[in-house]
Image (cartoon, rainbow, N blue to C red):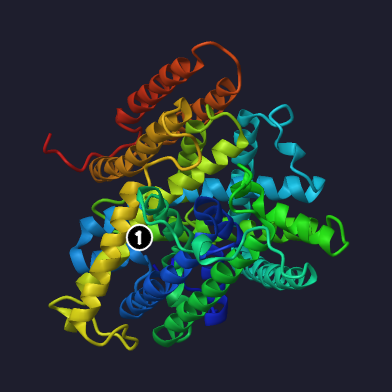
Amino acid sequence: MDDLTNEKGKYISWQTLAMMAFVTVIGLEDIMYNFQNQGMAVITSWVLMMFLYVVPYALIVGHLGSVFNKEGGGLSSWVRATDGEFLGYFTAWTYWAASIPYVVDTANCLLVDVGWGLTGTDEFEDPKFLSTAMFTAITFLIFIILTLIEHKFSESMEILANIGGWAMFVMTILFVLLAMAGLAKSGGRTATPFTWKTIIPKFDLKYFSTVGMLIYAVNGSELVAPYVTRMKDPKREFPKAMIALAVMTCFLTIFGSIALGIYIDANHMPNDLKMNGEYYVFGAMGKQFGVGNLLVYIYAWSSFFYNVALLSVLLDAMTRMLISDTGDKYMPKFLKKTNKDGLPINGYILTVFLSGFIMVLGIFLPDMNDIFNWLLNLNGIISPAVTCWIFYSFMKVRGKNSKKYPSVYRYIKNDTVAWLVGLALLVVTAVATVLGFMPQDVKEGTWVWWYELSINIVACLVLIGLGGIFPGIRRREEEYGLAFDKQQWTWMIVLILGSITFNVWLGGTKIHLRALYIVIESVIALLAVWLIGRRVPQGAKKTNTAN
């Protein structure tokens, strides 16, 4: 574990950790997503979220990080310490699986950033120029390139986190300041009227189905927990980093939403606001201040470095969480194996495969905007679902046996009150998860609505269900000394990558019944992988003679 979580003589400062957390938690685009869902009423939602969710959430993470300051797996280690090896493994898997759509979405954002950074317009999103299949293929290529960079440069994550985090934070402050200056310059005119009617939410089913996206926008601080052992004084510095994170998040969400209302009419929002909204706003600001598209270009490349940093942190942190301090009984050894730089390369490969699966699910959606929005909504389902583990773990720590878990930093001194706070957050998050399955950006009852609902269910079932395969692979390692031989690995990897590539290509064609052909091909490929993987590996040393 020490190879994964620390390097002798090197420490991460709490300021750096706070910025690493910042790039995983919030960005200007998160404000845009929820603005489209709720309009100006999102300001009230953010105020409620900040005080009732974000601050206690961050401080709970700080408390757990302080209690388990010697653990390297983050959330998975917390659950394992309170509930045993199996739940620790299952938490690690579900958290890792839930991060897959997040990294795919981040790779999509990178492509959008590059498009705006090179052209200054959204013309590159025209289906005639970039089909959904091509969009998926390029996203997959970007993902692989970033994975290779993370593999080759062991210190790239910290460097990128600082560059991307500060770039986005500076652009956010600039965004708010320019919006206020623009408001003064226009004589107080705003695109959306600022009245009590516009900022008070209508608390109906539609509203509550969007709460999951609010949670998705502000969660993720626990991803940096595996780095707690790389701090000089983790018991004191980790909570300090979480408090700094909460302050930055409060500033961005509340003032960012107010700034959006100055330039965007919440009653007549463009359908692609989630994908391009920040560029539309910076474009409007540039015209108002007479600098043309300059702000668009600056933001595009700032967002690019921010998303590169986010993807870098996600790739590293989510894989560490999966393999660090996870029970040997369930986690295959080949996934826990690291290279000379301490990087879990096999975990990265697994991430690539499942990311390809998520991308294939969306290739039948009409255009880039639909794919982008669907991935966001999928994150609004499974990300809050896994966040439930945090509050569950906190409740276990602050329950009847709280003396077993001493901590220098303590969030809420009274154990009963702390336990009730954890329960309240757990219930809210669980309800938001269930309601989040409803597609948000398409007309209810249409084929696209039903298709998105279906792939929401399929994605969640497959991502979580695949965790049941690992214990079986671990049993093969115990029985034969290795799970698969080199030839098996080669053929299985070729089949999976070939299947993903073929399906992406086929999905972009106009071939009749192509959906049926993709299902058939996928079943054949999976059957072939299963047949190859089930045979006894060459060089096996059978250690279990019970059969």
- Crowd class of label 1 (few under 14; some 14 to 19; many from 20; radius 10 Å): many
Residue at 81% x, 45% y is 119
The quarter of the displayed image where residue 529 is located: top left
Q: Viewer-proximal residue, 524 or 204?
A: 204
Residue at 47% x, 20% y is 518
Q: Amino acid at mark 1?
A: Thr
Q: From this viewpoint, is residue 488 visible?
A: no
Residue at 57% x, 74% y is 251
Using the image, determine if residue 1 lies above or below residue 70. Answer: above
Using the image, determine if residue 407 lies above or below residue 357. Answer: below
Using the image, determine if residue 429 lies above or below residue 471. Answer: below
Quarter placement of the N terminus? bottom left
Q: Which residue is mark 1?
A: 387
Quarter placement of the C terminus? top left
Using the image, determine if residue 132 lies above or below residue 314. Answer: above
The percent coordinates of residue 478 (x first, y second) are 24, 46
The answer to whether 165 appears left or right of 404 in the picture is: right
The answer to whether 377 appears left or right of 308 in the picture is: left
Q: From this viewpoint, is residue 450 visible?
A: yes
The quarter of the displayed image where residue 54 is located: bottom left
Instruction: Give the tally of numbered discs.
Output: 1
The percent coordinates of residue 249 (x first, y second) are 53, 71
The percent coordinates of residue 12 (x first, y second) are 54, 78
The percent coordinates of residue 48 (x first, y second) are 42, 70
Farthest residue toward the top?
A: 512
Q: Viewer-proximal residue, 41 or 492?
A: 41
Provide the secondary structure element on which disc 1 rests. Answer: helix
